[in-house]
Image (cartoon, rainbow, N blue to C red):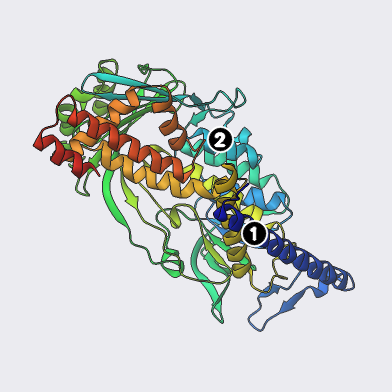
């Protein structure tokens, strides 16, 4: 029997990666055990060294293991995850009062599974969170209902939508229950650097006092408005559009427990429940220049341009929300990751990478990243004892990704599937926003219609795409196959029953 040459090489490469990773872990744990035995002979009061400026910095085996900047979804969840593993975590958050945002309100089922994996699933309880079981698409009076493929999961698994601030407060409370988490209100002003390595942060407390916090690992996750981003990456922020947010009260959505996407002109409109009595509406407005809210231009735009395109069941509640005047706006930022190699410092969440929030996948990506980081740090029993923490994380990340890809090639199952979540969901977010937005270009209009018609077919034609959006099946190969399937479907629409030169030309442009 002939053995495929590629499979043979894949097997040996995977075996080599496993042996190398195993040896690295054994050597590290052996060194850590030796250091722990040595430390036992020193009293606790000798574990700190005093400096001339009056500061007291922790040496190996004492003080803080990780400083986290920001206590939003990422910071709070990460603090809990690392503290559960025995790390001593110091979280510094600019404002510990409940946030009030118009995004970050939809957690996809894939994100909920990560929440369970981190032991934080109870954070969606007692905040009037609503179950979300799928999407409903609306275009030109037609409707397509798309359900999450949840048949293989526990009955509790579904998406969740809620007030962002309530969810964050629950996460903070959960993290604060652990004795090795210090949650402090303060504004981080700069990173502390020495010999090209990040040593910690400098911050101000509410009483305007300057403080410094040191740790072997500093993680910056202070959101899309991060003032530390430029120290750790090359930010290239684009603002393709803005969201205009409203809250509709005491109205019923056409499809209960579904997110609603209206493929309007010029760009999509979103509706989803955020409590048992409230529905969030997000109107996407292309560009950075918005009609003025103060002089009534925005209200007029919403009533004359947006309202007529909404489902009939929601028009009255929509106009009532506009008349109440509580109109909020937020720029939709897009920023690809471009990190600078900075030892002992990491960027995470919106501070590191942003995509258009149309698909609501941001929190799923963030929670997946937290699971990855937690697992990569687990072999390091002492972060001070790691000779090069950044190199350790990097090498293990590369080995795990390579191993996952090889396993997928051979068995179509990968234990490291969560490495694909960020790339798949972020790519899909940008692509769907482009496809779902109206355009004068005929090829793009055809692609938009082809996407809607393809999803309207139901069955496996809708299950696959929804599994990608929801984070339940984020394999990049599935994303590639979906792209070609929609394009081929769109070309078929143009060429049947009889091809024309115009149809052939537009079909060629779809590729």
Q: Residue furthest front?
A: 1
Point out the image quarter for the C terminus: top left
Q: In which quadrant of the rendered view does residue 249 lie? A: top left
Find residue 153 and report its horizontal and vertical position in percent.
Answer: 60, 27
Instruction: Specify few, some or many for label 2: CA neighbours under 10 Å numbering under 14, 14-19, or 20 or more.
Output: many
Residue located at (78% from left, 64% from top): 26
Q: Nearer the viewer, residue 26 or 121?
A: 26
Residue located at (19% from left, 43% from top): 508
Q: Is residue 199 above or below residue 369?
A: below
Quick check: 335 left or right of 73?
left
Q: Is residue 351 above or below residue 469?
A: below
Identify the residue position indicated by label 2 in the image.
Answer: 112
Residue 173: mark? none
Residue 12: mark? 1
Find residue 304 and report its horizontal and vertical position in percent.
Answer: 14, 28
Between the residue at mark 2 and the residue at mark 1, the CA separation in whole angstroms equals 36 Å
Q: Residue furthest bottom?
A: 52
Q: Is residue 15 above or below residue 133?
A: below
Residue located at (29% from left, 55% from top): 238
Label 1's element?
Answer: helix
Find residue 474 and report its horizontal and vertical position in percent.
Answer: 49, 41
Quick check: 52 left or right of 31?
left
């Amino acid at each position: 029997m002939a053995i495929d040459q590629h499979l043979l090489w894949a097997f040996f490469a995977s075996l080599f990666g496993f042996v190398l990773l195993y040896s690295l872990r054994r050597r590290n744990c052996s060194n850590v055990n030796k250091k722990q035995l040595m430390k036992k002979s020193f009293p606790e009061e000798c574990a700190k060294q005093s400096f001339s400026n009056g500061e007291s910095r922790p040496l190996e085996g004492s003080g803080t293991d990780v400083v986290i900047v920001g206590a939003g979804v990422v910071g709070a969840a990460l603090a809990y995850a690392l503290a559960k593993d025995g790390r001593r975590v110091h979280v510094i958050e600019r404002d510990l009062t409940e946030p009030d945002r118009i995004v970050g309100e939809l957690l996809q089922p894939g994100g909920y599974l990560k929440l369970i994996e981190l032991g934080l699933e109870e954070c969606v309880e007692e905040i009037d969170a609503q179950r979300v079981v799928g999407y409903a698409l609306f275009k030109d009076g037609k409707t397509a209902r798309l359900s999450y493929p949840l048949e293989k999961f526990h009955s509790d698994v579904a998406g969740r939508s809620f007030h962002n601030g309530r969810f964050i407060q629950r996460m903070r409370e959960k993290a604060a229950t652990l004795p090795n988490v210090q949650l402090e209100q303060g504004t981080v002003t700069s990173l502390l650097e020495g010999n090209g390595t990040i040593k910690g942060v400098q911050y101000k407390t509410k009483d305007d006092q300057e403080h410094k916090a040191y740790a072997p690992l500093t993680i910056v996750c202070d959101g899309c408005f991060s003032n530390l981003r430029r120290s750790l990456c090359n930010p290239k922020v684009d603002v393709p559009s803005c969201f205009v947010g409203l809250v509709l009260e005491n109205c019923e959505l056409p499809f209960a427990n579904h997110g609603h996407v209206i493929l309007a002109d010029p760009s999509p409109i979103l509706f989803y429940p955020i409590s048992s009595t409230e529905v969030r509406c997000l109107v996407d407005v292309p560009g950075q220049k918005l009609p003025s809210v103060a002089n009534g231009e925005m209200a007029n735009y919403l009533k004359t341009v947006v309202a007529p395109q909404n489902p009939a069941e929601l028009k009255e509640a929509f106009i009532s929300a506009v008349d109440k005047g509580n109109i909020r706006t937020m720029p939709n930022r897009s920023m690809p990751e471009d990190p600078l190699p900075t030892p002992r410092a990491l960027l995470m969440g919106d501070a590191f990478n942003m995509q258009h929030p149309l698909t609501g996948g941001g929190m799923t990506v963030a929670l997946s990243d937290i699971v990855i980081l937690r697992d990569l740090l687990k072999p390091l029993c002492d972060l001070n004892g790691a000779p090069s923490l950044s190199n350790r994380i990097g090498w293990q990340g590369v080995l795990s990704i390579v191993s996952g890809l090889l396993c997928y090639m051979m068995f179509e199952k990968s234990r490291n599937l969560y490495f694909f979540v960020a790339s798949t969901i972020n790519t899909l977010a940008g692509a769907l926003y482009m496809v779902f937005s109206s355009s004068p270009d005929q090829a793009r209009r055809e692609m938009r219609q082809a996407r809607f018609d393809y999803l309207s077919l139901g069955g496996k034609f809708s299950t696959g795409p929804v599994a990608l959006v929801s984070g339940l099946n984020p394999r990049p190969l599935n994303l590639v196959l979906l792209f070609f399937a929609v394009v081929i479907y769109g070309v078929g629409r143009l060429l049947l029953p009889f091809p024309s030169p115009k149809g052939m030309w537009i079909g060629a442009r779809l590729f």
